[in-house]
Amino acid sequence: MLKSLMGASLLLSGFYANAQMNTKVYGYIDGYYERSADVPQVGTNEKEKNAGEFDTPNIHALIMSSKDSYKTFLNISGSGGEQLDVRNAWVEKELLGEKLTFRIGKLYRKFGLYNEILDAVPTYIGIEPPEMFDTDHLMLTRTTNAMFHGKTNVGSDGQINYALTTGNDERKFDAQSIGLDVNYTIGTNWKIGASYYNSGGRAQSVNYGDASSNAGQADPGAGGVLNWMLHDTYDVTGVYVQYTDAKWIVQAETTTSNHDATRDAAIVGDICNLTTGATLNDRQRARFNCGGPINLDGDYTSSTSYARVGYIIPLTEGSITPYAQYDIYENPETIWQEEYGGDNEAGLADNGKFDKATLGVVYRPDFNVALKADYSEHIQKVFGKQANYGEVRFSFSYFWSL
Amino acid sequence: MKKLTGFLICFLSAAFAYADFAVIANSSVSAGSISKGDLKSVFTAQMGNFGGAKIQVVMLPGTDPVAASFFTSIGLSAAEFDRIWLEKALSGQANPPSKKGSSAEVIATVGSTPGAIGIISKGDEGKVSGGAKVLSVN
């Protein structure tokens, strides 16, 4: 990371030295309220009571500067109006015009429809991101450090966009990850693409540690490697399609991740013992072989798919967009307890799989403002019984610029 | 007769729509003309460079009749235009357009901003001077 930032600094210093820049400062403020119904728990018939949760205000400031073949971008987020988080800080230089550009720093990788635009909350239907980007079960790190990308025109209205990424990501020893994304767009209507990521060898979660320091201190969402894996060689493959016009937004994406992983016996042993069976279901305990020598073979496949449809209805002023979403996520390896790096959605279900159906609406009185409301129904089996629960959410966002 | 009247109304409306706006660029843009396809690509952030310059789009408000006429000519609604640029800007893919309240402001901004391309009222073409020039659309 340090090397990347130093490289970016060098490029940036050349950029500022002789440039008459075109600089824009803009961003948005958003807020969020969520309330879940009482949620089932593993190992008990008691349901977890949930109070409503506010997450407001979140402040996002973006600074983009460009001059000739250089461009810089800074994306700063103040979650909860408190701590500042530098989400992106990169500089890029066109090497062959728009056909080939090199970007370095802290950057969102191009991968599927949402990774790059996930901070662009005001622009998309839905309050929550697709399950692939839920921090409880990310399939790979969202940020990386270097990217070659470009686009080339095909025919009168087509364009091929491509990107090759690498970075520190999550890795161990000398593994060097590689990410690819290619899509074909037709005008402003169609986008069809595929993405691929390979850890390039053995990877390890940034939250990996020995049993004594790791248990209870895990931070879910670092990336695609579960905290209790000694090492994990994995890849992620996705395909996606999007159609948009003046009235419709239709999106579908499916992603699969294959893991060739080895568990850390001490950490998994801790998970088995510390939870004394109360928060692992029978399938998970059998998978880890909690009663005997820990099963070190942690190979598994996780997958997720979603479809989203929105229909824009113009009003005298602004627009209203009803939308529907359906998400599916499956991960047989994860556990319920988030504090051990688990996932309280997939880890709750008997088979590690849940579906989520969502209905919602976006009201835009003006293009700067988006007010959203939606309801989701989580659908899964817990202890052999259908145990669905609902969530209701509201959000607002306001785009500003200087 | 009704069909003929309808046809004439449509024809005249279309002709009016195309005649309603003019495209101007900063003098750093080397091209003297722009194709309709490239015009749409530039104004939808699919093309970031044109005429040897990095493009900065300058636009009238979507409610302005000149902007409405321009959007119609490239097959886009004002809401789509806003949505596309909001997404591009918030994800770091493109500089957001500079929105100006009048053709005079667009001319001034385009004239002083390297790489700028903007839309003005056709009737204001004669006011373009200094660092700005009119691009013919073909």
Image (spheres, helix red, strand yellow):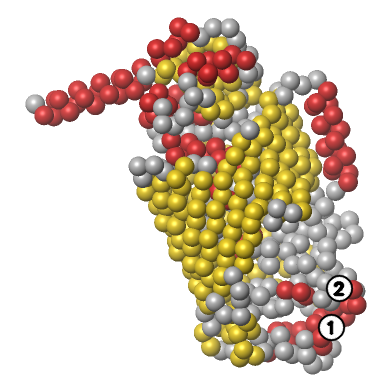
Inspect the image, locate mark 2, and give the three-letter code of the amino acid beneath it. Asn
Disc 1 target residue: A270
Q: Residue at x 71, y 43 (%)?
A: A75
Q: Residue at x 62, y 89 (%)?
A: A46
- Kindly check if marks 1 and 2 are in contact, taking CB atoms under 8 A apart as contact: yes
Quarter of image, res A226? bottom right
Please state which of residues B136 and A393 is positioned toward the viewer in this rendering: A393
Where disc 2 sits, the SS reads helix
Left or right of residue B7: residue A235: right
Please state which of residues B42 and A47 is positioned toward the viewer in this rendering: A47
Q: Residue at x 50, y 53 (%)?
A: A371
Inspect the image, locate mark 1, and give the three-letter code of the amino acid beneath it. Asp
Name the spot of residue A121 as percent of width and height, x first: 58, 51
**Is residue A91 something that shows in the picture?**
yes
Residue that extends furthest to the bottom in the rendered view of this protein: A291
Disc 2 target residue: A214
Name the spot of residue A325 as percent of width and height, x first: 48, 62
Q: Residue at x 71, y 85 (%)?
A: A279
